[in-house]
Amino acid sequence: MTTILSNPLHDTDGTRFDEYQLLIDRIRQAAEQLIPEGSTVLVVSKGDPALLALGRRTAWHFPRAAAGQYAGFHPADSAEAIARLDVQRGLGARYLLIPGTSAWWLRHYPEFVTHLRSCGRPVLEDPSIAWIFELTARTANLPSAVSTTGPSPEAQQLIDLLQAVLPSTATITFIASRDNEFVPNSPVPAFAFRYSDDPAIDVGEAIRDLRRLAGEIADYLVVPNSSREWLMGQKRLASYVDETYRLVTDQRNVCKIYDLRPGVRGAA
């Protein structure tokens, strides 16, 4: 379940307004010293625009909706936080800043913190100010086989279709196997929504997750040909997708693509 955030100026930990303003000043000083000008920084901001004023740096709310505004809720779990982080890395984010007032993230999302340390390095860990992580580019973590051998003909056919059909600014989510070639070779930022290796899933949870992803993180859902049978086996989920989202294309030997963007709906 998502959690609506409190006003950052009246945190439940008792932080007074003047102390919060001092914290913002210290965060800005730390950013000035540790984050190069021109960098894009993700900020666990609780929606407060003051935390995005980091001088000559581009600062984005985290979590962030597709249109750029604050998403309005905490990630449900580490998996969602990781997915959101990796999408933003793919879009150019190179730093993550967690203010001291949001230190609970480090306890609540342990797998997310582990992922942070695997895809970057801490440049500041000061509970009185913030945690700042320098992030590697998304492509830096691709398997070496991708760069040396290239994708299979099946994967290349799908990649070519994505390039032809989708806008270059799109973010997509896949139903695919865990060892799929589609996500690491995608021409636009991509992540897995569900894995077709999983014989059974909580369909209600999957539908809730897709609703949350639609228009906030992902613009399109891609179902490769190899995942069609799996999705058909999840009848309620398959019906929900078909009835709720517009089918962009159905290439029988390649994939199905659904438009998840708000205001673009199927025949429900």
Image (cartoon, helix red, strand yellow):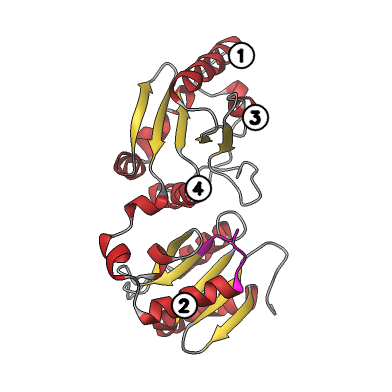
Judge depth for marks 2 and 3 and give the one in front.
2
Residue at 49 percent of width and 58 percent of height: 189
Query: Which residue is at the far bottom?
Result: 252
Query: Three-letter amino acid code at disc 2?
Result: Leu
Mark 1 burial class by Cα count in 10 Å: few <14, some 14-19, many 20+ = few
Q: Nearer the viewer, mark 1 or mark 4?
A: 4
- Circles 2 and 3: CB distance less than 8 Å? no
Contact between labelled residues 4 and 2, with CB atoms less than 8 Å apart: no
Label annotation for residue 88: 4
Which numbered disc, 2 or 3, marks the residue that appears first in the sequence?
3
Which image quadrant for residue 233?
A: bottom left
Name the residue carrying label 1. Answer: 17
SS at badge 3: helix
Q: Earlier in the sequence, mark 1 or mark 4?
A: 1
Q: Which residues are magenta?
A: 165-172
The residue identified by callout 3 is 49
Query: Who comes first in sequence, dot 2 or dot 1?
Result: 1
